[in-house]
Image: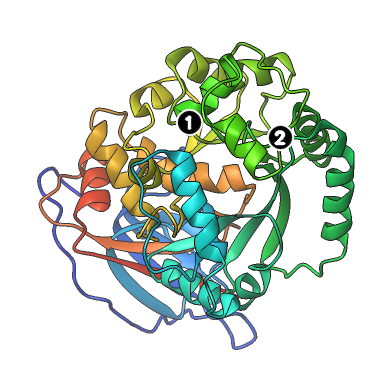
């Protein structure tokens, strides 16, 4: 395709291929793209072809003129990219229709969230399945679900959505670390896990998880070769709790019966403290990082940790945003999550990407699209998602844009900010 605006292609064509496979083979669809965005480090490919079978598995990726695979049906598109990944959700709050009021501090918001759950009476399984179905219609092919129990599992199974179920452990009491871990392992083994769901461990936050429990979570996850996840640097009060022992957290924890009498502030931030414990490595995934400073972000990057960003939630609760340029500039791998309905009306992970794009419009071209796709898939541990390559099953999104050039920066901005249409064309829930 030549320089200048990309022509707008609005047709979806169907035609018979003389060399179509015999009936015993799966049904194959050829998706053509004026511009293919394979992601996973691969650059855009003009006048491209992707052949997928009836399960959405990619059989061939090539320039259209070099295509070798037979196919049964042909569909023509303007731009094709992989399905996106929502790395951080709290489906426990799927029944909510409006967020808990924010803007008065994290503890006030969290108190409202917990009290509001007691009043929810709608069927949770149906609400979860419905919410995931709506996410899927927007192009999401996998989620990271964070929960303290398994109440959302039935709805996830019903939806068919690929899910990394992050079993979030809580406990600041040092003497409870081993019993909490033992109970979590027993609970995991007592569940019949659906084929679309994979298990992982997570920690709630530095103010609610003891160092002893954090070390057990890390040890267990590393032994399995898995990531472990934690809300980190979400609010300035968390830093105060660790640097001085003050702020609102001690009083709140005493009030809810979760205080550790032997607690002594280490005098440094949670990120720095975790580094002294050896917790920061390629298995560690920090969620939020709204309050993280430049040196802390550089430390996480140096330890090869990853990040999940939920800027809509951050804006709602505290009115702050992560340091997008510094996170991207550090080289740390990052992805996006919409967080829960208690802090975000949107279930569309593209809305999170849009906030980053508008706040930091000078980032390297393609880095935000990678965060939506291949980086998100990697952070959840799904090797077959996030990039369009033979053998993968990433889901395909067809996007139409108008008025953008054929450079990656222009396409990225148009895809995220102002698509004419965005449609999931391959890979449906199981």
- Rendered residue at 43%/66% (across/down): 135
Structural distance between the alpha carbons of marks 2 and 1: 24 Å
In the drawing, what numbered circle is on residue 289? 1
- Local packing at callout 2 (Cα closer than 10 Å; few below 14, some 14-19, many 20+) is some
Instruction: Work out whether 120 lies above or below 215.
Output: below
Decide if residue 430 is on the left or right side of residue 424: right
Mark nearest the camera among 2 and 1 is 2
Q: How many marks?
A: 2
Viewer-side residue, 17 vs 32: 32
Q: Which residue is mark 2?
A: 259
Judged from the image, the secondary structure of the residue bearing numbered disc 2 is: loop
Quarter occupied by residue 11:
bottom left
* SS at mark 1 in the image: loop
Image quadrant assignment for residue 139: bottom left
Q: Is residue 70 visible?
A: no
Asked if residue 15 lies left or right of residue 142, the reply is left
Near-viewer residue (314 or 236): 236
Q: Is residue 161 left or right of residue 106?
A: right
Q: Is residue 125 visible?
A: yes
Quadrant containing the C terminus in the rendered view = bottom right
Q: Position of residue 74 (x, y in %)?
A: 37, 75
């Amino acid at each position: 395709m030549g320089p200048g605006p990309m022509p707008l292609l609005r047709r979806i064509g169907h035609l018979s291929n003389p060399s179509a496979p015999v009936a015993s083979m799966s049904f194959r669809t050829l998706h053509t793209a004026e511009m293919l965005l394979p992601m996973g480090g691969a650059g855009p490919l003009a006048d491209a072809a992707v052949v997928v079978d009836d399960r959405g598995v990619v059989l061939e990726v090539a320039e259209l003129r070099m295509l070798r695979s037979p196919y049964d049906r042909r569909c023509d598109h303007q731009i094709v990219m992989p399905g996106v990944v929502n790395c951080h959700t709290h489906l426990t709050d799927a029944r909510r229709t409006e967020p808990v009021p924010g803007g008065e501090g994290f503890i006030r918001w969290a108190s409202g969230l917990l009290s509001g759950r007691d009043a929810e009476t709608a069927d949770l399984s149906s609400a979860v399945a419905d919410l995931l179905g709506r996410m899927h219609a927007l192009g999401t092919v996998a989620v990271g679900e964070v929960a303290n129990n398994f109440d959302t599992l039935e709805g996830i199974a019903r939806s068919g959505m690929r899910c990394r179920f992050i079993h979030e452990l809580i406990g600041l009491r040092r003497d409870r670390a081993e019993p909490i871990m033992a109970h979590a392992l027993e609970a995991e083994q007592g569940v019949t896990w659906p084929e679309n769901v994979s298990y992982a461990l997570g920690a709630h936050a530095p103010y609610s998880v003891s160092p002893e429990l954090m070390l057990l979570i890390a040890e267990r996850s590393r032994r399995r070769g898995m990531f472990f996840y934690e809300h980190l640097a979400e609010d300035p009060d968390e830093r105060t709790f660790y640097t001085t022992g003050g702020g609102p957290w001690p009083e709140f924890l005493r009030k809810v019966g979760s205080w550790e009498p032997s607690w002594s502030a280490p005098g440094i931030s949670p990120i720095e403290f975790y580094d002294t414990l050896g917790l920061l490595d390629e298995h560690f995934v920090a969620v939020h990082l709204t309050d993280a400073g430049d040196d802390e972000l550089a430390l996480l990057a140096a330890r090869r940790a990853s990040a999940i960003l939920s800027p809509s939630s951050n804006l709602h609760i505290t009115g702050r945003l992560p340091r997008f340029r510094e996170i991207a500039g550090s080289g740390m791998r990052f992805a996006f999550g919409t967080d829960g309905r208690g802090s975000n009306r949107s279930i569309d992970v593209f809305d999170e990407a849009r906030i980053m794009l508008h706040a930091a419009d000078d980032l390297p071209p393609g880095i935000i699209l990678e965060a939506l796709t291949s980086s998100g898939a990697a952070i959840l541990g799904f090797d077959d998602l996030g990039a369009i390559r033979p053998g993968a099953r990433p889901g395909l999104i067809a996007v139409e844009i108008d008025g953008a050039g054929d450079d990656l920066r222009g396409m990225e901005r148009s895809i995220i900010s102002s698509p004419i249409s965005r449609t999931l064309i391959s890979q449906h829930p199981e």
